[in-house]
Image: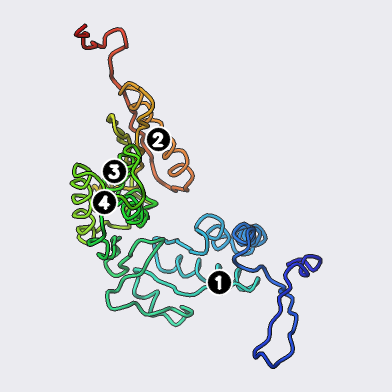
């Protein structure tokens, strides 16, 4: 904290009621205050800019690979990965930030003496990355959800609480999340109270949703999308729409000496607003727009070196309004 602002962070403290109260002044940014997230992120950005020349790999990783307080990065070989780790540690240590909990799918990285404060994995050899369970040895993503929701009463409050547990930033569970969004939309249409039992028709959808949640542990998705420097890569996007929702998904197709692989990279879905009477082709435009946004913000924002990227164009075919047949009125 700047010395002029430190008096704004005064606290009173004593270890025992019989002791005299002492006044302490906090000289660092206190986590929990409103500007703390911005200040923490801004500190990382400033450290990255200040060390661009001295530690180029580490400064680039800090600027692009941090999400809040989690560093998610990688490399094609151990030597480069170890250099990134070393530079990041030196940059952050210079400002008093100590990185802990190092995890990697490379056994040499974990067992190496140069790894600082690496923690052993639990019995399941899994760790959480942004709410997603990652199995480093198999290099797979898995979704694990506690089954304590199975006996909850079917109310709007409980359904919203269970749906909020699905933290899926990559959209890998987009079909399931979309079902939850549609169900919540129906509950709001019915104008039910928070603790009121839902109708039988919606209860059937809720039971199906819970059955799908219980199968989440059987889903495993490879983390690595095989973007080798020598591979020829293509981005394939697919978008579709219905009256209730629309969305898209992005696949990476890579061709190398080992063969051709297609991997799901990300997906996005949105629920269609029911209070607006929009023709289905307009939702098709919406899904295409979502896909183009993902490509621009997510794909092109990353650095894909030595990769030939081919774009798959989207063509929407639909009839003009003058050719759409409307049902004749019985009157």
Q: Between disc 4 and disc 1, whose residue precedes? A: 1
Q: Is residue 48 left or right of residue 197?
A: right
Give percent across and percent down for residue 22. 74, 84
How far across and down, in percent of the image, does residue 64 sit?
52, 54
The number of discs equals 4
Answer with mark 3 or mark 4, whichever residue precedes in sequence.
Answer: 3
Seen from the viewer's position, the closer of residues 299 and 13 is 13
Q: Name the residue carrying label 2.
A: 290
Mark 3, secondary structure of its residue: helix
Q: Position of residue 305 (x, y in %)?
A: 44, 48
Compare residues 30 and 148 and report the one nearer the observer: 148
Local crowd size for mark 3, using a 10 Å CA cut-off: few (<14), some (14–19), many (≥20) = many
Tell me which label, 1 or 3, sits earlier in the chain: 1
Name the residue carrying label 1: 89
Quarter of the figure with the N terminus:
bottom right
Could you say whether the residue bearing mark 4 is in a helix, strand or loop? loop
First-in-chain label (2 vs 3): 3
User: Residue 183: which numbered mark, if any?
Assistant: 3
The residue mark sitting in front, 2 or 4, is 2
């Amino acid at each position: 904290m700047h010395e002029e602002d430190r008096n704004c962070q005064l606290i009173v403290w004593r270890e025992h009621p019989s002791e005299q109260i002492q006044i302490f002044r906090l000289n660092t940014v206190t986590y929990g205050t409103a500007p703390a997230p911005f200040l923490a992120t801004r500190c990382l950005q400033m450290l990255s800019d200040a060390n661009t020349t001295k530690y180029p790999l580490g400064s680039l990783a800090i600027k692009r690979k941090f999400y809040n307080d989690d560093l998610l990065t990688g490399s094609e070989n151990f030597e480069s990965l170890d250099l990134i780790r070393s530079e990041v540690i030196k940059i952050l240590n210079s400002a008093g930030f100590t990185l802990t909990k190092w995890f990697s799918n490379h056994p040499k990285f974990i067992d190496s003496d140069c790894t600082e404060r690496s923690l052993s994995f639990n019995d399941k050899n899994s760790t959480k990355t942004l709410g997603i369970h990652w199995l480093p040895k198999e290099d797979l993503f898995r979704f694990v959800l506690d089954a304590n929701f199975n006996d909850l009463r079917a109310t709007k409050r409980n359904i919203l609480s269970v749906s909020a547990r699905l933290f899926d930033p990559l959209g890998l569970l987009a079909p399931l999340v979309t079902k939850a969004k549609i169900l919540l939309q129906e509950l709001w249409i019915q104008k039910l109270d928070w603790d009121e039992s839902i109708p039988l028709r919606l209860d059937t959808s809720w039971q199906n949703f819970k059955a799908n949640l219980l199968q989440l542990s059987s889903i495993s998705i490879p983390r690595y999308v095989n973007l080798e420097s020598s591979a020829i890569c293509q981005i394939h996007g697919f978008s579709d729409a219905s009256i209730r929702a629309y969305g898209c998904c992005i696949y990476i197709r890579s061709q190398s000496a080992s063969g051709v692989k297609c991997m799901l990279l990300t997906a996005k879905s949105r629920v269609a607003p029911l209070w607006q009477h929009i023709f289905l082709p307009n939702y098709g435009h919406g899904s295409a727009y979502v896909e183009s946004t993902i490509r621009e913000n997510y794909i092109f924002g990353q650095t894909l070196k030595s990769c030939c990227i081919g774009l798959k164009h989207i063509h929407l075919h639909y009839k003009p309004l003058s050719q759409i047949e409307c049902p004749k009125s019985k009157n």
